[in-house]
Image (cartoon, helix red, strand yellow):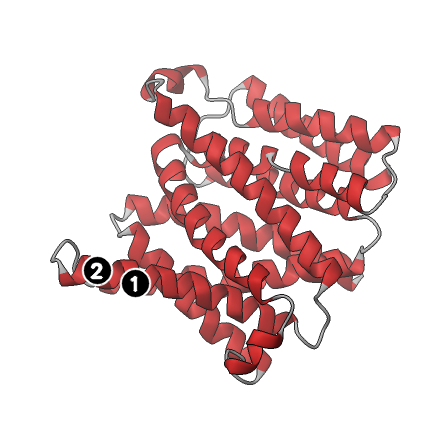
Amino acid sequence: MSSLFFLIASIILTAWLTIAFKIVGRLGINNLQAIVFNYTVCVITGTFVNGSFPVNSSLVKEPWLPWALVMGCGFISLFNLAAYTVQKIGVAAATVAYKLSMVIPFVFSIYLYNEDATILKIAGVAVALLAVWLTTRPAEKNKNEHKVSWMVWAMPLLLFVGSGLLDAMIKYVEQAFINPGNQDAYLITAFCVAATVGWLILFYLFSTGKQKLSAKALVAGICIGVPNYFSIWCLLGALKGYSGNSSAIIPINNMGIVLFTALVAWLIFKEKLSAVNWLGIALSLGAIALIAYG
């Protein structure tokens, strides 16, 4: 039951991050500052959860440190790319690239951990790919709103590769290094790396007069940072709880995020959903069932 709770919580919290970028864009809040404040808040949140700040010289001996460094850089790079994509393309449309990446950790889990690749699972992933594409396909009235350019294709492609590799990395680290005793230390270190990279960029922008400190960005960072920390924390908990079936958990997690964000985009932001989009939503539910019971 706790593993299912972690999975549902991860879906809702991760979906909130995508939705928050839409709100940040509408309010005219600086993306980079909000993201850097978010990671700073992640570090503070993790420190409270952990009971202490674990980043010190002894971390050099930890075998997971290189992975935390890479993951921290990946976090801030993908967050900035995701925020820009959401605001330029739309919540639902941007999700297609972000979550089609489920294929990468799925293949990773099958080949590296010898998990069962049942016919139902493979069929479920195939249906999931179709469902994500249909769910996030722009409605006819919106198609002309975004002129096709190299950037429209490049941003989703980068999100696809980056998100897939990051999900696969999270699974590998969880399997090889993470336990209840060091999970918070690992997450805090990764978020600390992301925050440090972000602050270095901000200090340069502040010192050259290209940006000024924004109070709105600080508030946005708090609203994003706390859920962000627990979204990864819950995902690790779900992966640990379903340790022999990660090839199913990551696709289900991603499909749940697609479904939730599409519905919120329709209800809250009034993004148009065509009959094709609704077909995609229906197929996503079928895909989750196939993968879960495969």
Residue 145: percent from left, percent from top? 33, 21
Residue 91: percent from left, percent from top? 45, 37
Q: Residue at x 65, y 68 (%)?
A: 63
- The type of residue carrying mark 1 is Leu
Q: Residue furthest left?
A: 209
- The type of residue carrying mark 2 is Tyr
Q: Which residue is mark 2?
A: 204
Residue 196: percent from left, percent from top? 38, 66
Q: Residue at x 52, y 41 (%)?
A: 162
- Height in image: 82 above or below 201? above
Residues marked 2 and 1 touching at CB (< 8 Å): yes
Which quadrant of the view contains residue 6?
A: bottom right
Q: Residue at x 68, y 31 (%)?
A: 284
Q: CA distance from mark 2 to mark 1?
A: 6 Å
Q: Which residue is mark 1?
A: 200
Report the front residue among 140 and 77: 77
Which quadrant of the view contains residue 143?
A: top left
Label 2: few (<14), some (14–19) or many (≥20) C-alpha neighbours in 10 Å: few
Which quadrant of the view contains residue 263?
A: top right
